[in-house]
Amino acid sequence: MKNSLRKFPRGTGLSAAVLGASALVLSGCGAPPAEEAPGATAAAGTDYLGCIVSDSGGFDDRSFNQSSYEGLKQAEADLGIQINQAESQAETDFGPNVDSMVQGGCDMTITVGFLLADTTKAAAEANVDANFAIVDDNSIELPNVKPIIYDTAQAAFLAGYAAAATSETGKVATYGGINIPTVTIFMDGFADGIAYYNEQNGAEVELLGWNKEAQNGTFIGNFNDQGAGKTNTQNFINEGADIIMPVAGPVGLGTLDAVIEANAAGGNARVVWVDSDGYETAGKGEEFILTSVMKLMGDAVEEVIKTDVEGDFDNAPYVGTLENGGVALAPFHDQEANVPEDLQTQLDEITEQIISGEITVESGASPQQ
């Protein structure tokens, strides 16, 4: 029987200036892989300049900026290209940083994040001979702009199911940085996964922080205020939530701080990380990360650059899904002993059902393919 979750209208995004660290760094040329014989890719790579501009989270955000940057660095190592990167401190830096990449002769400039869409579009229109790719936005329809987008709701559905199956209090929570589609898509999928767990198991696990039907919930208003993330998480824990998913970039580190303190005082709170595998990237509280909703941005960035190096650039969106491995649920790592014995088997079965279409995961923010 097909399990179809209700559709809701596409959410609207709010723009805000958000802060982080600022730097402009120039990196040198790497060598082509030893196993590859000299050819078109290696030769082209020698002169090819691939560039990236972060949003305000910075390249050490332990999240989507960092993952995208690692894809560029991997392209440098694998393809022998040169790279250049600019880290934005505020929204007002977006234009100057993108312009500096274009003026520096970048063959492709990758911009990271929905908030850079207007800047990317303007730069692409003004520089038709340069190619661009933008992570987490599909609003630009130009021949020289390649969207890199993800149906994150699919992997977040798995995380919601896992959180509901693992919660001891029957309450879990999520919150966002800014109310934009690339944030709410996680929250929608998480909510649907919890609802599906309840439906399949006769349970009543409650979600705090997000109402999918109303499309409203808890947002910090930025991606940098870790103190607000900590306070917000403490509030959720006080309300009874024992698993919290922050969809807020570096703000999520505040959630980890709150969970570390709560557990030191005898609690048993856990975190679902997003974008990257938080067990590998968060830098603290790894033992309390249940799992992570991953967007494999590094792989996509490298692949898009590779096609451009080879002269095969096109503007068709790259859409990461469970089927193509663009999104995935991270392992349970240290938490594996604390999850139900058959949970991984259930998640594997649900994954196959999502891929086959037997289970339909829908969010108003999901990419339109």
Image (tube, grey):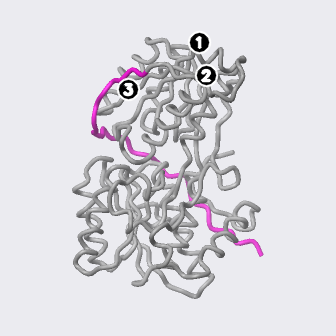
Q: Reading the chain from its start, which is encountered first: label 2 or label 1?
A: 1
Residue 243 sits in which quadrant?
Answer: bottom left
**Residue 4 within the segment the image draws in magenta:** yes
Q: Reading the chain from its start, which is encountered first: label 3 or label 1?
A: 3
Give the quarter of the figure containing the N terminus: bottom right
Which of discs 3 and 1 lies nearer the camera? The answer is 3
For the residues bearing labels 2 and 1, Cβ distance under 8 angstroms:
yes
For label 2, the residue is 144
Where does the image place residue 58, in percent across and percent down from the top left? 35, 38
Q: Is residue 48 above or below residue 265?
A: above
Residue at image coords 30%, 78%:
239
For label 1, the residue is 129
Residue 170 sits in which quadrant?
Answer: bottom left
Q: Is residue 224 left or right of residue 246?
A: left
> Around disc 3, counting alpha carbons within 10 Å, would you say few (fewer than 14), some (14 to 19), or many (20 or more)?
many
For label 3, the residue is 86
Which amino acid, mark 3?
A: Ala
Q: Is residue 213 left or right of residue 257?
A: right
